[in-house]
Image (cartoon, grey):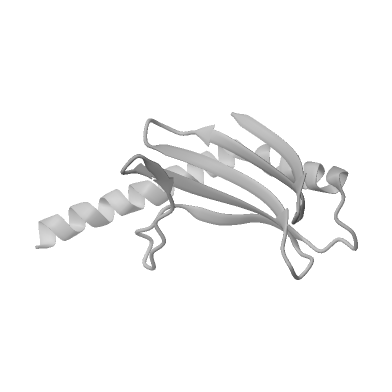
Amino acid sequence: MKTRYFRDRFGHQASTVVQLDSRRSLLISTSQWPDGVLSTTATVRTLRAGKYTLAVSTGGLGDFYKKVAVSSPGRVTADLVKAQHDSCVERLPELHSEIAAHYNAQTAKDVHCVAGH
């Protein structure tokens, strides 16, 4: 697990990368949106053709994505970003369970499609 806290032209941010297996990694990122909302998301990226990508799909067949926390502070500071990010990273066991359930459901759909075809 690797965590970075940084500031760029978009403001204070944080990111944590957790390698899940040889093909998937979990990215937890915290940043301020243009509307002032501070958002933390968890996204599983899958290694495809040598690059980590996010497959977006309706019907639950894409990669895992979840908005873990949202707040509307008056002012986004480095300490606030760190606190929100760290509290979401502490939820890794819960996220691991949700990720496993997400991909297990996809496997079940694949098996159902093959059996029903």
Q: Residue furthest bottom?
A: 35
Q: Is residue 47 left or right of residue 13?
A: left
**Is 57 situated above or below 30?**
below
The residue that appears at 48% across and 46% down in the rendered structure is 44
Residue 56, x across and y down, in percent: 41, 61
Q: Is residue 93 left or right of residue 5?
A: left
The residue that appears at 74% across and 67% down in the rendered structure is 34
Q: Is residue 56 left or right of residue 8?
A: left
The residue that appears at 54% across and 34% down in the rendered structure is 18
Question: Between residues 18 and 110, which one lies in front from this camera angle?
Answer: 18
Q: Residue furthest left?
A: 117
Q: Quadrant of the C terminus?
A: bottom left
Question: Between residues 75 and 9, which one lies in front from this camera angle?
Answer: 9
Q: Residue furthest front?
A: 9
User: In which image quadrant can residue 37 be found?
Assistant: bottom right
Residue 64, x across and y down, in percent: 46, 52
**Is 93 situated above or below 76?**
above
Q: Quadrant of the N terminus?
A: top right
Question: Between residues 94 and 22, which one lies in front from this camera angle?
Answer: 22
Give the number of callouts. Answer: 0
Residue 48, x across and y down, in percent: 33, 45
Residue 2, x across and y down, in percent: 62, 30
User: In which image quadrant can residue 72 be found?
Assistant: bottom right
**Is 83 situated above or below 39?**
above
Q: Is residue 108 left or right of residue 91?
A: left
The residue that appears at 79% across and 47% down in the rendered structure is 81
